[in-house]
Every structure is written in C-alpha cells, then in structure tokens.
Amino acid sequence: MTHGYIDIAIAAALVIGGLFTLVGSVGLLKLRAPMARLHAPTKASTLGVGSILLASVLFAFASDAPSYHELLIIAFLFMTAPVSAYFISKVHIHLQNQRDPLPKPARDRIWATMAKREEDTPSVPEMKSEN
Amino acid sequence: MATRYIRRLFPHPLLSVALVIVWQFLSNDPSINSLVFGVILGVLLPFATAAYWPDRPQVTRPWKLIPYGLIVAWDIITANITVAMIVLFKRNDDIHSKWISIPLDVRTPEAITALAGTITLTPGTVSVDLSNEGHALLVHALHADNPEKVARKIKQRYERRLKEIFE
C-alpha cells in the first residue's frame, strides 16, 4: 500500500466535507427566517456528504478493496433530498409564516399548495401517449 | 409487429439499463456473475411491473444527461462556496431572501421534476411549488438582489438543456 498523494486527497476531502457540514449547521442556527433556514441543510447534504463519501471511495481504493456503494448513496441522496425540502417548504406555505407574500404564478391562477378545490390541483400536462 | 413484441418484453428500456447498472454497483464486485444476474433483474422487474406503469417516460436524448450532470456538479461546488460565504460572513439583515416565480417552457412531468430537483440541489435556491396548471415554478432564493437574473440563469443554464434531453 502506497501512501502520499492519495492520503492527502483523502484528508482534503474529509476536511472539506466536514467544513461544509459545519457551515450547514451554523446556517441552521444563525438564519432567522424559516424559509432561509431551509437552505442550510440542503447544502450540507450535497457537498458535505458528497465529499465525505468521496473520501470513503478513495480510501477503499487505496486499501485495495474497491467499493462503489458510496456512489449509490450519493445518487439516492441527490434524488431524495429535494423531495424532503419540497415537503418542508410546503408546510411553510401552509403555515403562512413567511414574511413576504408569494409572487403570482406566471400564467396560472394559484400555486398548487394553496389549491382548495379539486380542479386546482396540477394535472399532468400534455402527456403524449406513444401507442 | 416485431417492435410490438420487443416493447412488450422491454416496457421500460431505460429502467432496465438503470437496474443493470445499479445492480453492478450494489454487488460491488464487477464480474460476469453479477452482470448476468443484473440483466435478469433488469428484464424481469420492468416486465413484471409494466401493468402498474403504463406510460413510458419520455427521454429523447439520454446521453445528454452526462454533460448536464457535470454542469450541475460544478454548479453545486461553486454555489456551495458562495452560500457558505453568505451564511458565515453576511449579517442577517443583509441577507435578502426572495420568492421567485419562474415561467416554465418544459412541459413533461419528468423534465419539470428534473428541473425542480436541480434547483433544490444547487445551493442558494430551493424549488417550492408548482402552479395549479404547471406553467410556473415557485423558487425561494436565499440571497438574491435581482430575482430576474436568477430566473434567467435557471432558464438558460438548466431548463434549455433539460428541454433538449426530455422533449
């Protein structure tokens, strides 16, 4: 097993990952508006976790036991993180605790979360059937 | 005639490919064994679940997803640094959070989902809601002095490319 550059790369990835996770936590404490606070953890979950997992991949390769699971973790994390952020912000809209009023949608009447009636929920637009 | 049978056997070709790749990563040991089993899964699972998933998602140019992914990865890194600077060094009163309404050109559900996901993953912006007919996306920006500029950047950088990939 050779040391050197790869160790430096692993250490750098760990430090960067830790740093951005820390910034995410600081943001959670520091920011005041609930919607602004939502921004902090989504950042930590992208670059923070991403580079820690990258360090794990590098370490696995350096110790001759290649592992690809981390890439799957990154892929699934990136697919699921927006969904949870979406639900949290939906709750904020329902609670209406934002300071600024929502802007008007460009062409439509209302935002889907505010819809009270059946016909106001989004329909699947112009789906082309291949059959 | 033949294409109909092929479609019957492979109702979701992209899903099959994705399953084979994911299985390769899961087994963590690239070999003929895991490849064969991955292919079996990739054929069997879409075939068995086809009844519950009648519409095939449209992806007209899937290979363009790769440069798109690289662009998004680069943007995540640079935007992370920008947002970290804002969080650490800007006073709370100086952070101007704004709602941004983005009119959409993309129409298919897959493209809108991908765009909303991209916006949330890029630091500084979170996609919040879709309008009732799906013509606009509500985005919250952590710090934006010029909402029009953010909306224009999102439309040019992401939406234009997603339109090429999905439509």
Image: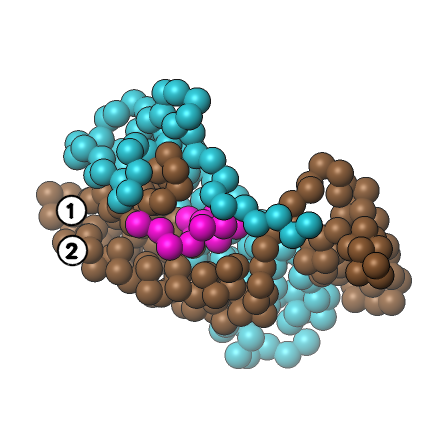
Chain colours: A cyan, B brown
Residue at 35% x, 38% y: name it: B131
Principal SS element in the magenta part? helix
Q: Between tags 2 and 1, which lies in front?
A: 2
In this rendering, position of residue A52 left or right of residue B56: left
The residue positioned 48% from the left and 53% from the top of the image is B111
Query: Foreground residue, A42 or A79?
Result: A79
For residue A65: magenta?
A: no
In this rendering, the answer to whether B39 lies above or below A61 is above
- Residue B149 in sight: yes
Q: Amino acid at mark 2?
A: Asn
Instruction: Using the image, tell me which numbered label, if any, was put on residue B146.
Output: 2
Confirm whether the magenta stretch covers residue B106: yes
| Chain of the residue displaying label 2 | B
- Label 2 sits on a secondary structure element that is loop
Q: Would you call the spot at circle 1 few (<14 residues within 10 Å), some (14-19), or many (20 or more)?
A: few
Looking at the image, which residue is at 45% across and 61% down? B163
Quarter of the image with the N terminus of chain A in it: bottom right
Cα distance in 3D space between marks 2 and 1: 10 Å
Residue of label 1: B96
Q: Which residues are magenta?
A: B103-117
Work out whether residue A82 or residue A67 is closer to the camera in this orientation and state it. Answer: A82
x, y percentage for residue A117? 39, 20
Query: Quick one: SS at disc 1?
Result: loop
Q: Amino acid at mark 1?
A: His
Residue B4: mark in rendering:
none
Q: Tell me the residue at 47%/43% (across/down).
A: A125
Residue B120 shown left or right of residue B27 in the figure: left
Could you say where residue A128 lies in the image, as x and y percent from the top left? 57, 49
Q: Give x and y (percent) for residue A79.
A: 53, 48
Residue found at the very far top of the displayed protein:
A117
Q: Is residue A51 visible?
A: no
